[in-house]
Amino acid sequence: MDKIATRDAYGKTLLELGSQNNNIVVLDADLSKSTKTNEFAKAYPERFFDMGISEQDMIGTAAGLATCGKIPFASSFAVFATGRAYDQIRDSICYPNLNVKIAATHAGLTVGEDGATHQALEDISLMRSLPNMTVITPADGTSAKALIKLAAEHKGPVYIRLGRPSVPVIYQDTQQFQIGKGIKLKEGKHISIIAAGIMVSKALEAADALQKEGITAEVIDIHTIKPIDKDLIIDTARKTGRVITCEEHNIYGGLGSAVCEVLSENYPVRVKRIGVKDTFGESGTPDELLKKYGLTSEDIVMAARELL
């Protein structure tokens, strides 16, 4: 299976968007080589702004550019883009509902050897609690490309969560995406697996393993965590009666919490949340960390057996 990092898809999509719309501008906080905005900087230097290690200034400047009709993409590692600049995102972007896109790379445990200080495990929680903010977590390079284009067309703040390592390509280029609408990747009748980001490919692997035991799992990619696709979540819960959520994020405040909010208010069923259990990460390879913190396809299979 081909692999591509969602941050690589981001860099390529920015180039495409930049050639189509002169209002696209890109800001970075001294990490353009890693966030892949450096290619846009080479192609369109008059529309690229390296703000240095100053995320608050980057967000404030992006807000100002948005008031002048520009479409800013502000880029940094997820842990810095959200945590260091939270106040500016809240008061300067979300409160006035400005048209700024925050593209945050290196999210989750798979930052790897950089360790806990660089692993964003709380960013979805921070961003989805902000009024007016849309939160997107692509599962692969194809969906990243499509959703970044939709984010550019969307009027208002958008948080786009991207990863560091290459991940399996799940979608064909012909797949249609819509902000706020999840995608059912696999039909099933015994259990539902609702995943986001890199965990979508893990969910598909788990479904294949469960199939060998005679258990059919419905796999859903919730690429937009806010606004979340309530209808799809309720429909799959009605069908299977059991739900597992999978996210590369703290289990508090992320996808699992969002799904539980929907189900508890509309169609309560048993839920197990696969995610980081309210702890910081540590240094290691991505695969080592996913195994240590229980984010593998084998962990999803075990959770399914416990629910059935």
Image: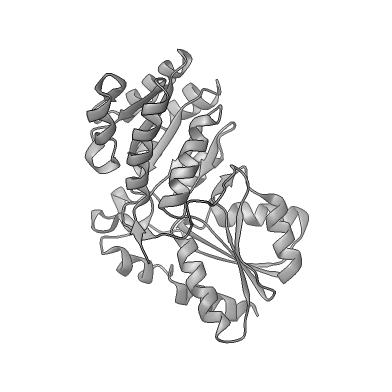
- Which residue appears at 47% of the width and 51% of the height? 173
Rendering coords of residue 11 (x, y %) = 32, 40
What is the count of numbered marks? 0
Residue 184 appears in which quarter of the rendering?
bottom right
Up-down relation of residue 222 to residue 37 (above or below): below
The residue positioned 74% from the left and 62% from the top of the image is 268
Residue drawn at point x = 31 percent, y = 63 percent: 286
Q: Nearer the viewer, residue 175 or 99?
A: 175
The residue at the point 65 percent across, 69 percent down is 187
Position of 303 with respect to 43 (left or right) is: right
Asked if one can make out residue 275 in the rendered structure from this viewpoint, the answer is no
View extreme (front): residue: 174
Q: Is residue 259 above or below residue 58?
A: below
Picture coordinates of residue 168, whole percent (x, y): 39, 62
Q: Position of residue 217 (x, y in %)?
A: 61, 73
Image quarter where the C terminus lies is bottom right
Q: Position of residue 117 (x, y in %)?
A: 29, 49
Looking at the figure, which quarter contains the N terminus? bottom left
Q: Is residue 141 above or below residue 93?
A: below
297 relative to 82, above or below: below
Along the viewing direction, whichever of 114 and 235 lies nearer the viewer: 235
| Image side of residue 75 versus residue 144, left or right | left
> Residue farthest to the bottom?
213
